Amino acid sequence: MTLHKGSCHCGCVTFAVEAPDDLDLHDCNCSICRMTGYQHLIVKASAFTITSGKNDLTCYTFNTGQAKHYFCSHCGIKSFYVPRSNLDGYSVNARCLDPVTIRSSTLTKFDGQNWEENAGDLRHLTQD
């Protein structure tokens, strides 16, 4: 496992996540992920730490209100969130990680437009 560091665009919000050097990422086509270009790295809560800027985060919820989409109140970048498929973990936007610690990444498509039918596919994705 490697400690990957990441941040929002302006650097006010920083975080660290423990994950493999070779990342398994997911490309969701739901409305919010498609519009933001989000690449999901799903991890357990114990593998994720906000290292600065917690007070600079704003939370956005929609639809069921279960997912907690956190974004920097200064630059607007959503670097991570708590997904409704894994309420005890985080989905980190791999695009917000420092690429120096990433050896490779594999991107798999996920049909989030039909979330209810496909959510079971997400429950096994947590990186160990």
Image (cartoon, rainbow, N blue to C red):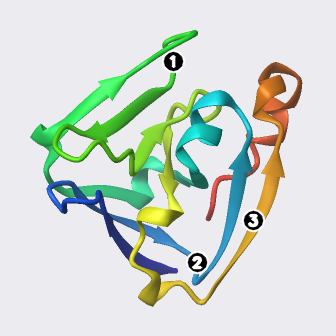
Residue 95, percent from left and from top: 49, 64
Q: Which residue is mark 3?
A: 107
- Disc 3 vs disc 2: Cβ atoms closer than 8 Å? no
SS label for mark 3: strand
Q: In the rendered view, would you say 88 is above or below 23?
A: above
Q: Earlier in the sequence, mark 1 or mark 2?
A: 2
Horizontal side of residue 40 vs 74, given as left or right: right
Q: Amino acid at mark 3?
A: Leu
Task: Give the amino acid type for the residue marked by disc 2 in the picture.
Answer: Pro
Give the distance between the C-alpha atoms of the residues marked 1 and 3, in whole angstroms.
25 Å
- 73 lies above or below 19: above
Q: Which structural element holds mark 1?
A: loop
Question: How many other residues sit within 10 Å of disc 1, few (<14), some (14-19) or many (≥20)?
Answer: some
Q: Identify the residue position indicated by label 1 in the image.
A: 66
Q: Quadrant of residue 14?
A: bottom left
- Disc 2, SS: loop
Q: Earlier in the sequence, mark 3 or mark 2?
A: 2
Q: Which mark is residue 20?
A: 2
**What residue appears at the point 48 percent right and 54 percent down from the top-left corner?**
92
Q: Gap in Å between the C-alphas at discs 1 and 2?
A: 27 Å
Looking at the rendered image, the quarter that the C terminus falls into is bottom right
Indicate which disc, 1 or 3, sits on the residue closer to the N terminus.
Answer: 1
